[in-house]
Image (spheres, rainbow, N blue to C red):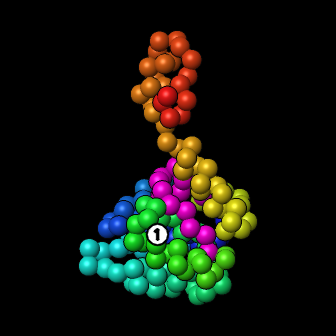
Amino acid sequence: MSTIPVIFVGHGGYPDGVRDAVEMILGEQPQVATVSLAPDGSTEQIAEQVAAAIGGAGNAALVLADLMGGSPANAVGLLALRNPDLHLVAGLNLPMVLEVLTSTASTAAELAAVAEGAGRDGVVDVAARLRAAASGTSQPSQSGT
């Protein structure tokens, strides 16, 4: 498993909820930090908390944000422009996090690629697959089309 810092950022309690679920499955994850945007919070606060979590400018880390274009992701995006070793992937979900945290990737850039692929592959129309299996027809694509 990687020792590269991984930070979950997002709105409200979502980042902490994802961490709780991950630790229920994998156990304690000391390399994981969470940063949440409170209703009265600011992007400046998010940026400061993420910078503190990675230990300063120039340190490698992977940030997984809940929503592309959301305030938390935008705040981290500005940090990533100044730090080429800070990687940001939006679409934070449990399959993504489990793959990242069990990966043997050795760089933040490699972890970002793992996150992107696992996040995309983790979205499955389960009902369509079950119906196809029950009817004996071929499996639909992952998007259900």
**Residue 30 drawn at (x, y percent):** 54, 71
Q: Residue furthest right?
A: 106
Q: Residue at x 46, y 61 (%)?
A: 68
Magenta region includes residue 104: no
Magenta region includes residue 94: yes
Q: Residue at x 61, y 50 (%)?
A: 117
Q: Dividing the picture into quarters, in which one does residue 43 lie?
A: bottom left
How many numbered discs? 1
Given residues 3 and 43, the one toward you in this image is 43
On the image, numbered disc 1 is attached to which residue? Answer: 73
Amino acid type, callout 1: Ala
Above or below, 99 against 39 in this view is: above
Under circle 1, the secondary element is helix
The answer to whether any part of residue 12 appears in the image is yes
**Residue 58 drawn at (x, y percent):** 66, 84
Above or below, 96 against 122 in this view is: below
Q: Residue at x 49, y 42 (%)?
A: 123
**Residue 99 drawn at (x, y percent):** 60, 53
Q: Residue at x 46, y 69 (%)?
A: 73
Question: Which corner quadrant holds the N terminus?
Answer: bottom right
**Residue 115 drawn at (x, y percent):** 59, 56
Q: Residue furthest top?
A: 136
The answer to whether any part of residue 23 appears in the image is no
Q: Which residues are magenta?
A: 86-100
Q: Is residue 59 left or right of residue 123?
A: right
Q: Dividing the picture into quarters, in which one does residue 106 lie?
A: bottom right
Q: Is residue 4 left or right of residue 92?
A: right
